[in-house]
Image (cartoon, helix red, strand yellow):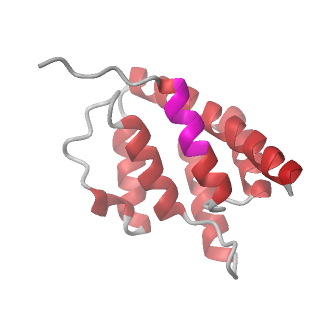
């Protein structure tokens, strides 16, 4: 039986909508994370998100656990993630291990960087679209 090809662009758009709608990562954090990703790389961006989550309080707190889970859902059709169960997103140490493992291979790292950049850009636009509907 043939595996169904999943449209990556569509999947990124779906997940960016979820992130914005559920405020998994706040609008300002998305903007800053995008800048850090472009200038400093995937791991630095991830450390920034973790750091923001540890300092924020309230209902709109950055949720790296949900972001990790959404990223895993996005990547599972394109990168072999069999060894990464959902519990890897459950605590900071395991999330950092997950990101370190994903970024060990240069081709995976470049692919993930492109995906994250597009995801953050789409999320930024989703926030603008949601604000425009209010």
Which quadrant, please, contains the C terminus? Answer: bottom right
Which residue lies most toward the front here? 133
Horizontal relation, residue 74 to residue 119: left or right: left
Question: Residue 14 at x, y = what percent?
Answer: 55, 40
Which residue lies most toward the bottom here? 58
Please report the residue visible at 45 percent of the width from the left and 23 percent of the height from the top.
7
Q: Is residue 12 visible?
A: yes
Horizontal relation, residue 40 to residue 15: left or right: right
Front residue of 123/37: it is: 123
Q: Quadrant of residue 6?
A: top left
Question: Residue 88 at x, y = what percent?
Answer: 32, 59
Which quadrant, please, contains the N terminus? Answer: top left
Front residue of 26/12: it is: 12
Classify 33 as above or below 121. below
Please report the residue visible at 22 percent of the width from the left and 22 percent of the height from the top.
3
Q: How many marks?
A: 0
Magenta-colored span = 9-16
Question: Residue 71 at x, y = what percent?
Answer: 46, 45
Q: Is residue 36 visible?
A: no
Classify 110 as above or below 117. above
Please report the residue visible at 63 percent of the width from the left and 33 percent of the height from the top.
117
Please report the residue visible at 69 percent of the width from the left and 33 percent of the height from the top.
38
By secondary structure, the bulk of the magenta-drawn segment is best described as: helix
């Amino acid at each position: 039986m043939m595996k169904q090809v999943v449209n990556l662009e569509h999947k990124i758009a779906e997940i960016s909508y979820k992130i914005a709608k559920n405020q998994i990562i706040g609008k300002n954090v998305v903007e800053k994370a995008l800048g850090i990703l472009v200038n400093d790389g995937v791991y630095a961006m991830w450390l920034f998100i973790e750091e923001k989550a540890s300092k924020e309080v309230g209902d709109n707190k950055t949720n790296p656990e949900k972001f990790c889970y959404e990223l895993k859902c996005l990547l599972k059709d394109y990168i072999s993630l069999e060894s990464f169960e959902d519990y890897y997103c459950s605590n900071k140490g395991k999330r950092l291990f997950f990101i370190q493992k994903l970024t060990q291979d240069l081709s995976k790292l470049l692919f993930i960087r492109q995906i994250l950049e597009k995801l953050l850009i789409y999320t930024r636009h989703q926030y603008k679209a949601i604000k425009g509907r209010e």
